[in-house]
Amino acid sequence: MNEIKYRLGPVVLLAIPFLAAGQEPASMKIPAPELRDVSAWINSDPVKLADWKGQVVVVHFFTHGCINCIHNYPHMKAWQEKYAGKGVMILGIHTPEVAAEKDLDRIRKKIKENELKFAVAVDNDARNWQAWGNRWWPSVYLIDKRGNVRYRWDGELNYKEVRGEEIMRKKIEELIAEK
């Protein structure tokens, strides 16, 4: 019996975040950490989040080799199109999970292949990942017009039909409406 507990214990602990992840976004109100030590910028000159105050910012932590991250791409692209000119900025932060995902040429190639047009900060040393206290690929954060992180979604937005895209889209619209 103890052997079963010993072997199943870690499996259960690892499964808990996936069972609970993504049902509702985590709600908070903390200042967004400023971007730091970005290895490279793709689709943009260097960006400071402070320069985007007054706009709603969607931050998508991802890596090009993660299938759940790839499943979020259509939502990021749709939001970029839907909210163009409406005070919403999309920022990807590519933080590699394995050494092979640090190759800048490969990152650029994958971003081009997937037709991602938003600014991407390459976070090869995971400085931004750490500053944000991020834990999962992918994670989506929403920053309000005052520069505060208000919502976080861990995991694929529509994993197992949880309707995360719809929920976060409504949160984006609430943040746009705020004065």
Image (tube, rainbow, N blue to C red):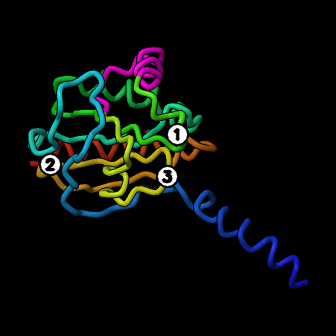
- Mark 1: few, some, or many residues within 10 Å (few <14, many ≥20)? few
Bounds of the magenta segment: 105-120
Residue 97 at x, y percent in the picture: 52, 44
User: Upstream in the sequence, badge 1 or badge 3?
Assistant: 1
Would you say residue 147 sits in the magenta stretch?
A: no
Residue 45 at x, y percent in the picture: 18, 26
Q: Is residue 42 above or below residue 144?
A: above
Q: Is residue 144 above or below residue 131?
A: above
User: Upstream in the sequence, badge 2 or badge 1?
Assistant: 1
Q: Report the Cα–Cα distance between label 2 and label 3.
A: 29 Å
Residue found farthest to the right = 1
Would you say residue 115 sits in the magenta stretch?
A: yes
| Left or right of residue 6: residue 116 | left
Q: How many marks?
A: 3
Q: Is residue 49 above or below residue 28?
A: above
Residue in the foreground of this view, choosing between 12 and 20: 12
Three-letter amino acid code of the residue under disc 1: Ala
Residue 178 at x, y percent in the picture: 14, 48
Q: Which mark is residue 178?
A: 2
Q: Residue at x 48, y 37 (%)?
A: 63
Three-letter amino acid code of the residue under disc 2: Glu
Q: Report the Cα–Cα distance between label 2 and label 1.
A: 41 Å
- Mark 3: few, some, or many residues within 10 Å (few <14, many ≥20)? some
Three-letter amino acid code of the residue under disc 3: Trp
Q: Report the Cα–Cα distance between label 1 and label 3.
A: 17 Å
Q: Residue at x 29, y 63 (%)?
A: 28
Residue found farthest to the bottom = 2
- Residue on which the image places disc 3: 136
For residue 33, which quarter of the picture? bottom left
| Left or right of residue 127: residue 75 | right
Q: Which mark is residue 99?
A: 1
Secondary structure found at label 2:
loop
